[in-house]
């Protein structure tokens, strides 16, 4: 007699579309919320409303970025790519939707803020 139940396994929801991938925790990026992760010396943030899904970041740094089901880039919270590759990927974004901050100095590395010269001198 054949049975379809598997008594040796704990009860788990049947989710074949959601494979168990502990190295890539599922992130649900809301349209108005950034996707953020600290990777290497950088804090990497994707500003979802600015992302147009060009995927240049994914092409350059596939261990740091991926497109979600809405074709919006998000940061993969894992080891990621090396720091220069992450910065290059951010610089490749046509809408500057990726913000990179150096966690050692606290300064935003990309996009570079241009402050007007101090006119009080």
Image (tube, grey):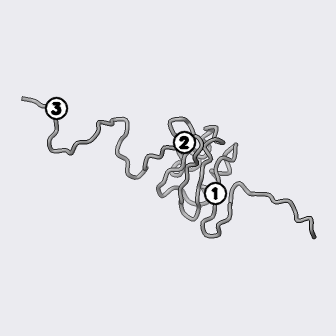
Q: Earlier in the sequence, mark 1 or mark 3?
A: 3
Disc 2 vs disc 3: Cβ atoms closer than 8 Å? no
- In the image, which is nearer the foreground, mark 1 or mark 2? 2
- Closer to us: 91 or 51: 51
| Mark identifier at residue 100 | 1
Q: Secondary structure at mark 1?
A: strand
| Residue found 44% across the figure and 46% down from its top | 26
In-image side of 65 versus 50 (left or right): left
Q: Secondary structure at mark 2?
A: loop
Q: What quarter of the picture does the N terminus occupy?
A: top left
Above or below, 57 against 44 in this view is: above
Above or below, 115 against 46 in this view is: below
Quarter occupied by residue 2 = top left
| Residue found 59% across the figure and 61% down from its top | 42
Can you identify the residue that label 2 sits on? Answer: 30
| Residue found 51% across the figure and 40% down from its top | 68
Q: Secondary structure at mark 3?
A: loop
Disc 1 vs disc 3: Cβ atoms closer than 8 Å? no
In-image side of 118 versus 96 (left or right): right
Q: What quarter of the picture does the C terminus occupy?
A: bottom right
Q: Earlier in the sequence, mark 2 or mark 3?
A: 3
**CA distance for labels 1 and 2:** 20 Å
| Residue 53 in the image, given as x and y percentages of width and height | 61, 38
| Mark identifier at residue 4 | 3
| Residue 73 in the image, given as x and y percentages of width and height | 57, 43
| Residue 18 in the image, given as x and y percentages of width and height | 37, 39
Badge 2 local density, few (<14 within 10 Å), some, or many (20+)?
Answer: few
Badge 1 local density, few (<14 within 10 Å), some, or many (20+)?
Answer: many
């Amino acid at each position: 007699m054949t049975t379809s139940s598997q008594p040796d396994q704990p009860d788990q929801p049947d989710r074949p579309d959601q494979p168990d991938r502990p190295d890539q925790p599922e992130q649900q990026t809301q349209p108005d919320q950034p996707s953020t992760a600290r990777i290497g010396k950088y804090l990497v943030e994707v500003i979802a409303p600015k992302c147009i899904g060009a995927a240049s970041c994914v092409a350059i740094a596939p261990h740091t970025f991926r497109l979600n089901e809405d074709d919006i880039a998000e940061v993969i919270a894992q080891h990621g790519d090396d720091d220069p590759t992450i910065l290059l990927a951010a610089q490749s974004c046509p809408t500057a939707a990726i913000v990179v901050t150096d966690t050692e100095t606290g300064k935003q590395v990309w996009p570079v803020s241009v402050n007007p010269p101090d006119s009080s001198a």
